[in-house]
Image (cartoon, rainbow, N blue to C red):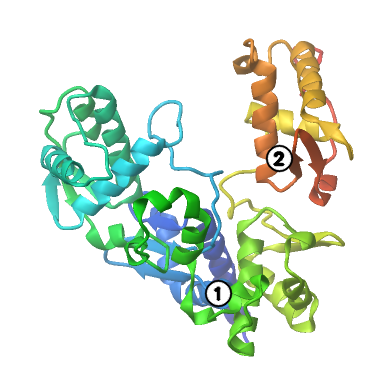
Amino acid sequence: MSNLSNQLVIAERDEVARGIRIMLASPLVHERGAPESFDLIRRRREPIRKWFDYYCGWTLVVEPRQGYARLAKVRPMADASRPPRRHRSGRAPFDRRRYVLLCVAAAELLSVPVTTIGLLADRMTRATTTDPVLVDFDTSARGERMAFVDALRMLEHLGAIEVLDGATESFVDSTEAKVLYRVDATLLMRLLAAPTGVSQLAIPVDEVPARFEELLSAVSRERRYGAAAEHASGTPPVSEVQRNLWLRHSIFRRLVDDPVVHLDDLTEDERAYLNSPTGRRLLRRAADEGGFLVEERAEGVLFVDQDGIATDSRFPDDGNNAKVAALLLLDGIGPVTTTEQLRVSAAALLARFPSWAKGYRGDNGTHALVTDALEVLRGFGLVRVTDGRVHPLPAAARYAVGTTRSSDSGEDTP
């Protein structure tokens, strides 16, 4: 093979690896928002699609004409660590009302290729009024209009609707605002990654809160595994092929989606598969094709992306006070540490660095700082908190803290 051919093969491999990690960080990539990323995924869509299908069992759909790529990541677990956020200052997470209005708006938009914000609001008012479960949508209340606008701006961000004229935010100040939208109904349908539609479950509404975990498993159930996915609960798998397929996909979904995979969190069958010759070979092959480094320890495994492409959040990260506090507090977490002890340590940090973390200087600042820091550590798989006690997980040993000296103040800074 010529030197040019070798260079082309290496370039293609690097682009495929980059495309895989881009889709992991952003399961919906739109040409309008990320033209270079979309172009790469469009050109290398077939090997990227095959990688996700083989290792994770996830479906990648690339629509070159519509200008988007959508990765349907299916996992039967509730994760509130990355909620949709309002596209306004503060970036507050969606509350229950905004989730409801987002779903109602998406449902009403499916049947219209073009609409205005006023017509959509009228349709949603009628829909909520006739539904015995939903609270009526009342555009006379400013809070309702703000929640409605937040839902629509999320759909704009996702590319499901496009503003042709006007500004969505103007509806907050006046119900007479004129905003024209083009609707991508196909993309709206693809926003849902669940293999089973909620409407197919036929569960009485009053039973939903008590049966939430059951319903989550039901909408996430994938038929191709048969009963293999329920094998851990005692149901025998339908076939050895389905069992091995489920084991491969369940393990690699964790590896690419979680910061670290602790062996204690895997089932006995999953641990056996990962430690088998086949599992070891696939582990290294998947990492090589995806552009990851494999870090293995006695307690677990993680995929390391040295370029930081495959994640939407990093740790350590000195750009966020909670993450800085998390790193500093992690250094003092021993086998038996309480949240109260961490508050004492946090108070000492705030006293030592009076110009740092000004947002945590109120009456409840120490408590809030520890709470946010622990959320960071939990999110990155570094600690477990039970009954007021903080237990370090094996991955926490990767991090060691040093101090730096500020060049302008001459004092130590976090």
Of pointers 2 and 1, the one earlier in the residue sequence: 1
Q: Residue 387's x, y, as percent?
A: 75, 36
**Residue at image mark 1:** 51
Is 206 left, or right, of 314 in this rendering?
Answer: left
Q: Amino acid at mark 2?
A: Leu
Residue 353 badge:
none
Name the amino acid type tagged 1: Trp
Above or below — where is 156 with respect to 16?
above
Residue appearing at x 60%, y 79% in the figure: 228
Q: Quadrant of the C terminus?
A: top right
Q: Residue 377 appears at what percent x and percent y? A: 71, 40
Q: Residue at x 42, y 52 (%)?
A: 208
Q: Residues within 10 Å of mark 2 (few under 14, many from 20)?
A: many
Between 252 and 318, the one lying in front of the other is 252
Q: Nearer the viewer, residue 304 or 113?
A: 113
Q: Which residue is mark 2?
A: 377
Q: Is residue 406 visible?
A: no
Q: Is residue 381 left or right of residue 31?
A: right
Q: Quadrant of the N terminus?
A: bottom right
- Nearest the eye: 227 or 252: 227
